Image (tube, grey):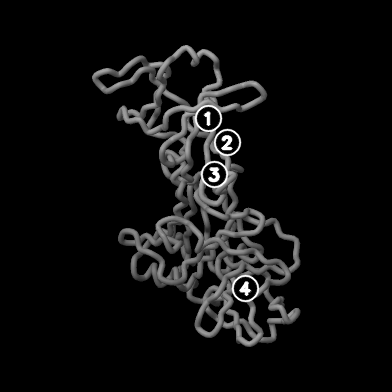
Amino acid sequence: MKQGFKHLLTVLFKHGYYQDNMFKSLDTSFDDGTPKLLRDLDIIIKSFPGGIHLLAANPELLMTTNDDNPIRLLLHSKDNLFVNFTDLPDFSPSDHLLYFNNLGNNSVVGSHTFLLHEDETVGQNEMIQLCAGKFQVPLFDHTKKYHFTDAADMEIPPQSIHSINESGEYSLTGMTGNLIKIKEGNSEISRIYYRPNAVWKKPMGIIEIYTGRLFNQHLQYGKVDYSIHFKNRQTIWKYFLVNSVYEKFGNLTILNKEKEQVFNIPKKQRVHDNLEALVFESKNKIPISEITNGYYQLVDNYVSPQKPGKLVLKKLPNASPDLIFQDTENPETTYFSHIYI
């Protein structure tokens, strides 16, 4: 009997919003079939703030599992503002999953670290449409032939695929949940994550660890790291000066710590009933972060570093992820952070 466990893998969750870049508010749980698989393989998974460790008593057992039975980790964010401060355009928590696996040519970062996404940070390629009970082939053409594979590119048996109607709707049997690749010939046209009509507490995302692939990486590199990087959202910051005390100043401006004017000339704007505010809008998008190394100051009559004017507020508050608004004229591209003073 093996007396100890060997450390094979660490999965790291990173996010640019947090000061230390570690996504500590991300929790993991197991899909229904994973606890038994872990017992069969003598694997222990230990969580820590910002990731998990995987340890195996007998690593050779990882070669015994089928490609259709990976270790499946469910991801849940304890921070309900995750979508607000994360750069994931068009991500809908109710309709999408963030899907990751250790198959394919994952980017290598360093000697033994692999990104579980295609680009430098999580993006459109990891956002998968969630389908329950049935799914639709995009731009379906009845003259074309389609076929379906799983995440490992294994063909789904024809007897498991059922055409519902002539508009390209299908259902599957014999599958509890899996990534489905919809293909026309050799071309992949879409991906979905399929669930039957079962009650399911939907996670934010899923990581599938194929143990054979992990074992081969372990043989080559020793202990390996998988890394998932989220990018923090960037917004146009708008400072609203609503206190009448600011009316006594004649030439207010906002400077960064390098004494650069990164905000436009202020404009008056009605914010509520008869209440007017002096509004400063940033010239460019600024990242939202938990704690920023940069800061902004409110100064009156600033001319130059040699003529700095009068300091009104030494450090303005940062943008908060709970006050983000879309541009009504172009909601898909521009988000605003409102900060009231």
The amino acid on which the numbered mark 3 sits, given as a three-letter code, is: Ser
Check the image and report above or below for 60 versus 226: below
* Badge 3 element: loop
Q: Which residue is mark 3?
A: 25
Residue where numbered disc 4 is placed: 138
Q: Are marks 1 and 3 in contact (CB under 8 Å)?
A: no
Count neighbours of disc 2 (C-alpha within 10 A) and say few if under 14, some if 14 to 19, many if 20 or more: few
Q: Nearer the viewer, residue 264 or 119?
A: 264
Three-letter code for the amino acid on which mark 1 is drawn? Ile
Q: Residue at 36% across / 27% down in the picture? A: 255
For label 1, the residue is 339
Element class at badge 2: loop
Residue, disc 2: 323
Q: Of residues 285 and 82, which is closer to you in this image? A: 285
Q: Position of residue 195 (x, y in %)?
A: 68, 67
Residue 318: x and y in percent read: 47, 31
The reply to whether dot 1 and dot 2 touch (C-beta < 8 Å) is yes
